[in-house]
Every structure is written in C-alpha cells, then in structure tokens.
Amino acid sequence: MALTPVRHVVHIKTTKRYAKYDAELDTTVCDRYNNANLTLTMRLGFRQINPAGGAASGTYHDYGDPTKPARTIVRWTPGSWSRWKTNFVRSAQPFWNGKFWLVNNFPTCLEFEDGQTYRPNIYCRFRLSGADVAAGGSYHHTIDVVRLDPSESFFGSHSTLYDSNDTQPTPKDTDSTGAAVMQRAHVHEIGHLLGMGHATQGSAACPQGPRDDTNADACYGTSDHDMHSVMGSGMALYTVHAFPWRWAAADITGKGTVRSPADNRELRARRTRLLGGPQPDPTTNDWSAKMVRHYPRTQDEARLGQAITRRPSR
Amino acid sequence: MSECARTPVETSRCVIEAILRDLSDTYTGLDGGGIASITQDATWKYTVAIAREERLDLITYTVVLHDDGMVEITDRAKSTKSY
C-alpha cells in the first residue's frame, strides 16, 4: 500500500547545523515497520603533530603543555596516518551508531498514513568523518594527533589532542569485583564532542559550577555502574547517552524538553538541597531513549502507551 | 638527631619516601603516565602530580617530621588540573 502522509505532516529530510555536529531528521523512510531516522553527522579534521625540524623522531609534552613530561614521538608516514584515521572512524562510528530509539510521545508529531495512522519513533544514527585538515574543508572539531614511539605507553591526551594509541583498549580503573575497567579513549572523547560530560557530572560527588573541576576522579564514577559508563572509565552505553539525539529531536520537531544528564543531576541535587531529602529524577519522558527497537505505533497503541518491540503483523 | 633530620635533602628523602609509600597504598588509578612531578609547596607540604588522560591528579600531602625521624602524614588532599 502506498505511503500517504497525513495532511499535517510532510515526509521530508530536515537538517540543522549545530556547532558540534549536524542533525538530519529523515521521515521519508517511515512506514508501518520503520521509524524516522535522526542522523548526527560529525566532521573531524585531523592534524598531524610531527617531531620538530622534519626529524624522524622527537618529543612532545603531555597535554601540549611544555611544563609537563615529554614523550617520544615519531613522524607520521602517509600510510600510518591514513590507517590511523580510518581505524579511528571505523571503530568510533559503529560504537555510537544505531544504539538508541527515541519514543515519540507527541500525538500528531511525525504521524503518517499507511492504511491507518501511525506514529513513528526515531532511530538514532551517527555518521563520523575524519579528514586531513591540510586538505581544507570545514570541520566541527579540529584534533591534533601525535604518533607515539613504540617505546611509549602513555601520552597525556585531551579532547582536542589525541595520540596514536587512543584507539586501543586501556585499563582505566578497577571495579568492586577487582576487575579492570577498560576503555578505548576515542569513543569517550567522541561523547565529549557530542556534548556530554562525565558519568557523574552534576551530582553532589561531581559538581559542575564555574569553580568545579569536572575531570576529578569522582566524576568518572565511583559506583560500578558509573565507572563502566563510556563517559566514566568504561565502554558501557546507557540510555542517558542518547542525550544528543534527544536534544536534536526536540529542537527539530519543536516538541518536548530535554536536559543533559549533567543538568538533570544538578537539578536533582539542587532540589534535594532546597527541599531536603532525596528528590525524584527530574528527567522528562520526552523522546525517552530505549536500547531496543521500538516499532511505529498505531494511534490506539500510542494512546494505550504500548511499546511495540517485536515485529508486529500489520 | 635522626637520620631524617641530618640534612635538608635527607629530610626531603624521608618525606618523599613516606609519601610514596602512602601513594602505593591509597592511589587506585590504573592508567596514565605515572608521577609527573613531586613539588615542595611549603616546608611541610608536598604535591604529587600524576598524569592521566585529560587531567593531572594532584595529591597534596601535609606532613610532620617527629624527633625520632618518623614522618607523619597529617593531611592528604586530592584535586585535579584539567586539560
């Protein structure tokens, strides 16, 4: 049966450009089984940092701070540079792509006719590109990258200064069972570039005022759950990490309110201080995130609050 | 006079050894580049900087040197310098 949009919805692709990424909401793919796609596209511009004077080997300081320890670096070759960029994108993109579905809790929003009226949810996609700044072009973020000498096991990286080992799994912490908590730093950094803070940022353990340091150890998590978070010291994705898509969905559709996980925690901490005693999580249910596929719903299914997580017979 | 009070350098050595022993017992971070610096901020206050991703962990120790040469750690404060 042909797809006929209801009269107040036009099936189109809507793109918005933000500082950190672009977002495209595509409703042309909607049918009784398929949701709208919301694709966040991030363009990274990588810039080589090579030893001074064209030497094959040299040093570079942690964090790019000349007062901090120097590590031995080697010159990038065309092959190593190309492989590193490819590996970065090929491993970071799938980590964030296609992991979340946002439940559409707004009557009429994005609804379409396909035999009857359906309300699609939103499937969250992520597209990452990494190109050489030297080639020109426009980028959401520019990242400097050092190539560590094989003798080096550590370099002090940050969100815009990476090293060639940042794509490798590294033990970051130990959980309550004594197991090492492993992380590939680049997926954590992509989380920052998407606008997310550390796992407990905004909580009493990790306040985020102007004088507070949100890189303090406690901000990476003290509970196993937070410690294993990709925005802590681990690789676990939770629904809170759908925040960039939820925020873009609210902005593009003009429906709903979405706060960052850190702002939610801060709001809860503030309410707790003002009102005394633990306060409920102030997170709104708008565009609530799920980590299993939620199929489009009929109006009746939506009205009853049903979640269609198994392929229905339509 | 205890060995630790014999010269200023010996005093520093005793203090730093006590700090390093405490650090081995209490610091739980697994990753990073190890100790980037140990600086004397005041006569009886030292700061250890440990290089981690995105930050330096700073552990500031306040110590007392007793007559018998024992170094007592009276305060250990942790902070962070972010990058």
Image: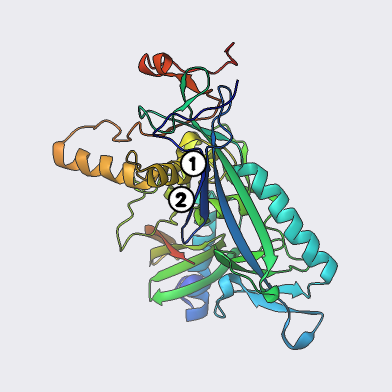
* Residue lying farthest to the left in this orientation: A275
* Residue lying farthest to the top in this orientation: A313
Asked whether the residues under the numbered discs 2 and 1 touch, taking CB atoms below 8 Å apart as contact, a structural biologist would say: yes
| Residue B54 screen position, x and y as percent | 53, 61
Q: Tell me what residue is drawn at x 27 percent, y 30 percent.
A: A280
Q: Nearer the viewer, residue B34 or A70?
A: A70
Visible residue check, residue A253: yes
Q: Nearer the viewer, residue A108 or A42?
A: A108
* Residue B31 relative to residue A10: left or right: right
| Residue A126 screen position, x and y as percent | 59, 46
Instruction: Report crowding for label 2: few under 14, some 14 to 19, many 20 or more residues within 10 A (C-alpha).
Output: many
Visible residue check, residue A160: no
Look at the numbered disc 1 and give the secondary structure of its residue. helix
Residue, disc 1: A241
In the rendered image, the quadrant that contains the N terminus of chain B is bottom left
Residue, disc 2: A196
Q: Tell me what residue is drawn at x 62 percent, y 54 percent.
A: A186
**Alpha carbons under labels 2 and 1: distance apart:** 8 Å
User: Which chain contains the residue that carries disc 1?
Assistant: A
Is A51 drawn above or below residue A287 in the view shown?
below
